[in-house]
Amino acid sequence: MEKTINLKLKVWRQDGPKAKGRFETYEVKDISTDSSFLEMMDVLNEQLIQEGKEPIAFDHDCREGICGMCSMYINGHPHGPDEDVTTCQLHMRKFKDGETVTVEPWRSAGFPIIKDLMVNRNAFDQIIAAGGYVSVSTGGVPDANAIPISKEDADEAMDAASCIGCGACVAACKNGSAMLFVSAKVSQLALLPQGKVERARRAKRMVAKMDELGFGNCTNTGACEVECPKGVSITNIARMNREYLMAKFKD
Amino acid sequence: MTKIDSKIPEGPLAQKWTNYKNNQKLVNPANKRRLDIIVVGTGLAGASAAASLAEMGFKVKSFTIQDSPRRAHSIAAQGGINAAKNYPNDGDSVYRLFYDTIKGGDYRSREGNVYRLAEVSNNIIDQCVAQGVPFAREYGGYLANRSFGGAQVSRTFYARGQTGQQLLLGAYQALMHQVNEKNIELHTRTELVEIVIIDGKARGIITRNLITGKLERHFGHAVVIASGGYGNTFFLSTNAMGSNGSAAWKAYQNGAYFANPAFVQIHPTCIPVHGEFQSKLTLMSESLRNDGRIWVPKKKEDAEAIRKGKLKPTDIAEEDRDYYLERRYPAFGNLVPRDVASRAAKERCDAGYGVGATGLAVYLDFKDAIDRLGKDVIEARYGNLFQMYEKIVDENPYETPMMIYPAIHYTMGGLWVDYELQTSIPGLFAIGEANFSDHGANRLGASALMQGLADGYFVLPYTIQNYLADDIRTPRMSTDMPEFEEKEKKVKEKFEKLLSINGKYSVDHIHKELGHIMWDFVGMARNKEGLQKALDEIMKIKKEFWANVRIPGKADGINLELEKASRLADFIEIGELMARDALNREESSGGHFREEYQTEEGEALRRDDEFAYVACWEYKGEDKTPVLHKEELKFEYVELKTRNYK
Ligand code: FES
């Protein structure tokens, strides 16, 4: 049954990439525990607009946990306290009446802040552009059933492919490493025959790009896997390291 | 009246596309490099088109409002993609997919277009597999298929419950590959705000940089609109928060016809509305209807007790449950097309049998499937959907039935295009959900992904050449031309006006009002009186908006409220055109149900002799009544029948 709660919110406000940020404190009342975290933020923004203030800028789109756009660091966790969810799927029933909730943007060298809770995750696109694909043009490909692929490989590739590119892994990592994101794509394509041809080149290029863009090193803390809303596994990182070594070995 | 030329090629149905390709004009490689193509939107249609055109050698400029092309709302499609591969050997064929699509669309689409769609469907699967899309497979290593609403064969390919995501990532990766090759110039967080027409041809766009607020000008020899549908007119829908109809609406305001705006799809299996602050609705894939059985209590008192929280669904004995779809449609049962399933749910709820706290919900029950197949099998098929449901509703669907209710999901209407996917403005093309072309009055499940990718990978890259072949001598134009200047000025003034209102209500507040009117009068069941009322009410909302909207902040820099306001200004006008079109169409067809036109059993009553046409609306200026043109639909290969899923 529907319940309502009151909350105090400490929200990071920052006018622009270069501006100095600060926490602002707000109060929201009568929030239905059935509503989502972002719906609660909508209520707060509506309040701010009514007061003639600028609403809090945050990224979001699908609000069903698949586009990877929403990105809030809530009470010290990317996407907040619940497991296996994105911020948009986090529901207010996970919070207690009267609680103080701290909301921050992703903080990482690879993701500069744009405004308030919005960050720039362009680096992920650049890493994909460097090699996260099979180089095939439209048309002229064989029948889809020409190459059988074992169900295990297809399933494992799908597990890796379920990454939504939100960047929670980077935000969770004390080194700001993007290894989980990169390894998920490297793994998916290395597991499938269509991707095997370019696997060495792909691993090298994607890793080089990642290093170039200011992401930190992986020291196997495993924080990324814990915070990943889609449960992408760090075994992908191990696989990528093998791919990478093999590629270097061939050189 | 202007004659509407759909440019369907000559020849027998199965030969039309081949004939077209054999006779169309092509652009040679050296000339391709000299031609710029603007593609607006990076969903399935936009990304696949941009990538394919760039691979061919054209210079592509690609635009998206999101921070990355990978976020487009195509990503949220769950269930699958149809193709006529007939891998399961259950009698499928290109003709059958064509026939099902025409019939599912309630005979309001073009035979020629739909046949081509069915024809290229198989290439899409081949292409996606080659890209490394991890489709579901059987133990033998071959591709798995499942069935979907409105079909009697298993022709749907899927990647768990994330098919849209995987297909979009495939297209996105192809696009990023071309960005890396410098064949695509990618503009993220950039929104189209005007279209530039020079000498009657689309030659560019004006955009707003959503970070700096700067207005920017871009030239293209041709412009492709791939910006999706306008379902968010209703405020609450399954569309992403940013999905909007503005790019298509700018095309309309510049003279492109808008076709069948009233044809909107209401999806039967969404999570019911919970409260006033709800921002969007979540879809539960239709594939669930393969194994879930839909029911409400047979007795009103049981339904009432459930609503009050005194009874649980599991307390209702088998004989006291009304599996109303199985009862009414024994041949298709729970797999009837979306419009039929949606209306049946509304009918039961209106009659007082609805469940959930609001009474606006029905059950989707997996108990029988779990007993028959085991929990593991159900988990393997729908695990992520069940998890999503539990996160939102806080109930475990393995133990208690899901609650579902229809919600706005997809718009079949859109920019009118001919066989070449060209709008009525030369050089302006529309693909994917943004056009009206293939789904008629109702879209079948797993066909949106098919159409988006068909347009983007396999149709537009051919047809656009037929247009560009005559343009090879046209040099790139300067964006200092007066036509660019003028459009930019117009946009600037509009934004200034919006910011100067400084009224009482937030954008969302007014948008919700619009949504209520749309849902009540232009929703699942419509009638003349209601539609006239809707037109009046929408006019009032329009006035209210322009007098009383409050947008904090400035035009430069990030201003999310300004973005939303400029989209809402268009949604209000789109809503008006939808109501007008629904009023004009005095029949029931597919997703458009006019209460005055139904059979004694409450089924939709089509009126083919009067309404077998595409309604093409032409803009006549601000606050002027648009003009209706009719494109007659000719059926040479299928016989018009009353849809029967009994
Ligand atoms: S808004 Fe799309 S994942 Fe949260």
Image (tube, coloured by chain):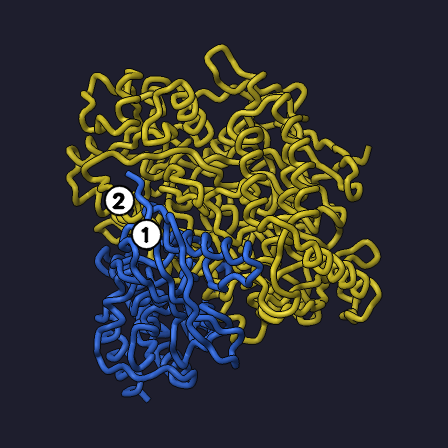
Q: Position of residue B147 (x, y in %)?
A: 34, 37
> In the displayed structure, would residue B153 be above or below residue A42?
above
Q: Amino acid at mark 2?
A: Asp
The quarter holding residue B179 reads bottom right
Task: Locate the N terminus of chain A by quadrant.
Answer: top left
Cβ of mark 1 under 8 Å from ligand 1: the answer is: no
Residue designated by label 2: B394
Q: Looking at this view, is B517 or B190 the one in front?
A: B517
Callout 1 touching callout 2 (CB < 8 Å): yes
Q: Give the Cα distance between marks 1 and 2.
A: 9 Å
Left or right: where B100 falls relative to B86: right
Q: Position of residue B219 (x, y in %)?
A: 72, 66
- Colour yellow, chain: B
Mark 2, Cα crowd under 10 Å, few <14 / some 14-19 / many 20+, is few
Q: Colour of chain A?
A: blue
Query: Badge 2 sits on which subunit?
Result: B
Where does label 1 land, which residue?
A: A91
Residue B529 placement: quadrant: top right
Residue B571 percent coordinates (x, y): 62, 45
Looking at the rendering, the quadrant in which ligand 1 lies is bottom left
Q: Where is the C terminus of chain A found, in terms of image quarters?
A: bottom left
Q: Callout 1: residue from which chain?
A: A
